[in-house]
């Protein structure tokens, strides 16, 4: 069975060995305040800086999920309230979570701008050019949900103060861990707000991570597997080139199919090439056609991603994540070409 589900998604095959190592070598039984464990956290943070080209002055912490990051931004970095210009289901959810913590009573005083860089639900993305425009127009903090693009494409990290991603998408790992990146300005804001009421208050997390520790017993297995995957992957500039090439090929593939058929059963959900995601391709069809192709793919040993939110029954999604091999992409293309 091969999977193109955009999260949880295909994990790197080597992850099986890494998990076995972590258990055989007793890593999962290490005390999380021991030197051995702190070394793993330290190396993981260093590798994130190195492989993802994260600026040296940006801080990195590991938490449990992107959803947790939504709450950390609201509780620890938002003094008044936040702005959420969204275009899909994840952006909407983020706004709902944030507004339960910091209600939108006075949006004129919003002090955090929250952007979903890659909207997994409909396969759109916010380009670095658009983010640069936000940076020019908004003088306060910018927080970016990059769950389904971090480790898949390159970012200009300086265009935002907070970036986060859980690892079950482009990192090619099992769920249960998230990477939280924050700038010196974000840390300064956390200090000004001084919020320290939660186990996951950013100041408390920061204090722990500055000693390569964590506030609570962390997902040690997940951290170890992240470290091992980061050792294995290419630098982000190389991954970025591959992801974008594959994305361009996928979009050309579906555009060609629409041109050569009179009434194509499927077409790309997003018409504007400038907003199409590099890492999640959304394909639209009638409810019946979508149901049929997902079932036929399953029969052929291929899992397509279901639609999500408003697009649940009228789209399927194809993850374009680095752990997916050229051979698997070839298999799916062959299936789609022969599908009638
Ligand atoms: C998957 C996803 C999330 C949720 O991640 P969790 O690890 O389940 O919290 C948030 N935002 C986006 C854009 C996603 O794709």
Image (spheres, helix red, strand yellow):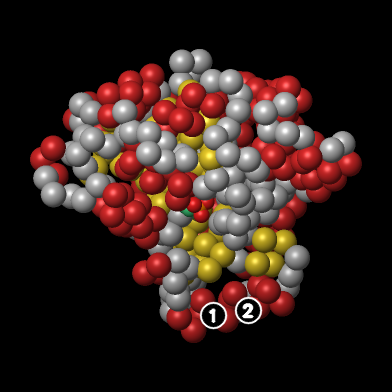
For image coordinates 72% across by 42% down, the residue present is 221
Q: Nearer the viewer, residue 162 or 77?
A: 77
- Visible in this render: residue 159? no
Q: Nearer the viewer, residue 125 or 39?
A: 39
Q: Which mark is residue 295?
A: 2
| Spatial CA span between label 1 and label 2 | 6 Å
For image coordinates 36% across by 69% down, the residue present is 310
Q: Could you say whether the residue bearing mark 1 is in a helix, strand or loop?
A: helix
In the displayed structure, 223 sits above or below 302; it is above
- Visible in this render: residue 266? yes
Q: Could you say whether the residue bearing mark 2 is in a helix, strand or loop?
A: helix
In the displayed structure, 140 sits above or below 176; it is above
Few, some or many residues within 10 Å of mark 2 (<14, 14–19, 20+): some
Quarter of the rendering occupied by the N terminus: bottom right
For image coordinates 54% across by 20% down, the residue present is 210
Q: Residue 218: x, y in percent? A: 63, 40
Q: Residue 258: x, y in percent? A: 47, 66
Q: Which mark is residue 57?
A: none
Q: Residue 320: x, y in percent? A: 58, 50
């Amino acid at each position: 069975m091969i999977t193109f589900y955009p999260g949880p998604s295909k994990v790197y095959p080597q992850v099986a060995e890494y998990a076995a190592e972590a258990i055989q070598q007793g890593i999962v039984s290490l005390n999380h305040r021991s030197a051995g464990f702190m070394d793993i956290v330290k190396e993981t943070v260093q590798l994130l800086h190195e492989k993802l080209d994260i600026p040296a002055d940006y801080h990195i912490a590991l938490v449990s999920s992107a959803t947790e990051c939504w709450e950390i931004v609201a509780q620890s970095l938002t003094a008044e309230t936040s702005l959420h210009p969204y275009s899909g289901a994840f952006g909407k959810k983020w706004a709902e979570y944030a507004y339960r913590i910091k209600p939108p009573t006075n949006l004129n005083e919003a002090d955090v701008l929250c952007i979903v860089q890659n909207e997994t639900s409909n396969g759109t993305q916010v380009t670095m050019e658009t983010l640069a425009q936000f940076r020019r127009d908004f003088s306060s903090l910018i927080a970016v949900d990059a769950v389904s693009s971090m480790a898949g494409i390159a970012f200009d990290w300086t265009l935002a103060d907070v970036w986060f991603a859980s690892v079950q998408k482009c990192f090619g790992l099992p769920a249960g861990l998230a990477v939280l990146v924050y700038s010196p300005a974000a840390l300064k804001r956390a200090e000004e707000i001084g919020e320290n009421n939660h186990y996951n208050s950013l100041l408390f997390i920061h204090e722990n991570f500055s000693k390569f520790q964590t506030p609570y017993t962390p997902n040690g297995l997940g951290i170890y597997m992240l470290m091992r995957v980061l050792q294995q992957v290419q630098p982000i500039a190389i991954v970025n080139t591959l992801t974008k090439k594959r994305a361009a090929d996928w979009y050309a593939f579906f555009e060609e199919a629409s041109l050569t058929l009179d009434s194509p059963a499927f077409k790309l959900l997003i018409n504007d090439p400038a907003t199409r995601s590099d890492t999640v391709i959304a394909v639209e069809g009638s409810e019946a056609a979508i149901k049929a192709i997902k079932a036929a793919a399953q029969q052929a040993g291929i899992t397509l991603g279901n639609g999500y939110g408003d697009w649940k029954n009228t789209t399927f999604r194809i993850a374009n994540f680095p752990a997916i091999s050229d051979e698997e992409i070839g298999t799916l293309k062959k299936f789609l070409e022969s599908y009638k």
